[in-house]
Image (spheres, rainbow, N blue to C red):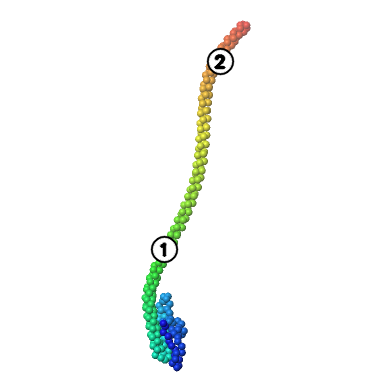
Amino acid sequence: SKPRLVLLGAGGEASGGALLDDYVEETNPAISPCGFKKMDEKPYDGEVLTRRVEELQRERDELRKDIEQLCMQQAGPGYVSVATRMLSQRTTALEQDIEILQKKLSGCLRENQNLQEELAEAYRVKSQLADLYGAELSKTKELEQQVRFFQSSVAQAFAERDGSLLECEKAKEREEAGLKMCATFEERTREYQTAMEDQKRLNDALQMELTELKAHTESSLNVLLKNSMKFVRGNVNALQTLLLKRNAQFF
């Protein structure tokens, strides 16, 4: 149970019971029932902890003064023992709190030092990374230029490939046209060869017929010549006879 602080009147009788903690909380609500201010559980940095320690020390001094004033105003040995015990408890709690905060402050200072060292290391690493980033950036720009060059080369190669494919298509069309023309020429050649063979056979037949006609003509000419000679000779003989007769008549 909480210790009760009995406020006595001017005649020494109790004027009413009240808890000392209630009285303290009414006068200073920030103070907890155990006699010191409630601490936040969140971590503090060094400056906050330092202010907290100074604040707790001021509160401790103020509590001491308040207890002394209460003891001087009130009478009775019971009240003095209770007030002394409460003051001792609160003082002990505040000292423990101050000690804890001082330890936390020392830890925070060490951590701050470590963080400063880590920050310096981080700045050094950042500088190195900045240098590396600059080098990588220049490499990236160079690679981008190479990529653009390769892209233009690839685009040119694709254009040349498309042109080559177009030329191949045209050459294929010309080849197909040439093959068709060759097929037409071959067909015409076969037709010409057939016609030439037919003409040769016809020429051979005509040659044979001409030979036969020549032989027949020669034989016919021989016969005609013989008959003509006979006719001419007969006519010559008749003319000679007629001339002889006429000559005989004149003479």
Q: Does residue 5 show up?
A: yes
Report which residue position mark 1 lands on: 136
- Vertical position of residue 136 compared to residue 7: above or below: above
Observer-side mark, 1 or 2, equals 1
**Mark sitting on residue 224:** 2
Mark 1 vs 2: CB contact within 8 A: no
**Mark sitting on residue 40:** none
The amino acid type of the residue labelled 2 equals: Leu
Label 1 secondary element: helix
Q: Looking at the picture, tell me which residue is in the foreground, 242 or 39.
A: 39
CA–CA distance in space, label 1 to label 2: 123 Å
Q: Looking at the picture, tell me which residue is in the foreground, 140 or 199.
A: 140
Q: Looking at the picture, tell me which residue is in the foreground, 84 or 221.
A: 84
Q: Earlier in the sequence, mark 1 or mark 2?
A: 1
Please report the residue visible at 38 percent of the width from the left and 74 percent of the height from the top. 111
In what quadrant of the picture does the N terminus appear?
bottom left
Q: Does residue 51 show up?
A: no
